[in-house]
Image (cartoon, grey):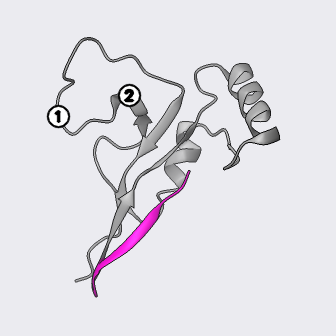
Amino acid sequence: MSTTTRSCSPTRALLTSGAKGATDDVDADRAHHVAAAWNERGTPKLTVRSAAQAESLFDGLELLEPGVVSCSLWRVGPARSGEVVPVAEYCGVGRKPLRT
């Protein structure tokens, strides 16, 4: 999971990209096998996490709705077509809370 922040003003920062990562909540054996194979040659290295572990990466940030969910389910509005099927990858978007 990776995040990038960009300064917007002295009192707030914008998260320019969310965080995403593979999960073992769907098929643990397959997730760890795929991550191990990828990590032999690929970059960046994959870390397999549960939903709770992924959500903990947002500690100190305001987690935007719908929170940490399967990437295919993270939407601001309704799905555009057909049934949405969960995938074995979580994502979320957070932002630094505004200072008052």
Label 2 packing within 10 angstroms: few (<14), some (14-19), many (20+): some
Tell me if 30 is positioned left or right of 74 in this view.
right
- Tell me the number on the disc at residue 46: none
Asked whether 44 or 11 is in front, the reply is 44
Disc 1 residue type?
Gly
Where 46 falls versus 10 (above or below)?
A: above
Q: Name which of mark 1 and mark 2 comes first in the sequence.
A: 2
* Count of labels in the image: 2
Q: Which residue is mark 2?
A: 72
Disc 2 residue type?
Ser
Q: Residue at x 36, y 61 (%)?
A: 16
Residue 8 appears at what percent x and percent y? Answer: 27, 77
Where 89 falls versus 81 (above or below)?
A: below
Hey, which residue is sitting farthest top in the picture? 82
User: For residue 97, which quarter of the picture?
Assistant: bottom left
- The span picked out in magenta is 1-12
Q: Which residue is mark 1?
A: 77
Q: Secondary structure at mark 1?
A: loop
Q: CA distance from mark 1 to mark 2?
A: 12 Å
Quarter of the image for the C terminus: give it.
bottom left
Q: Secondary structure at mark 2?
A: helix
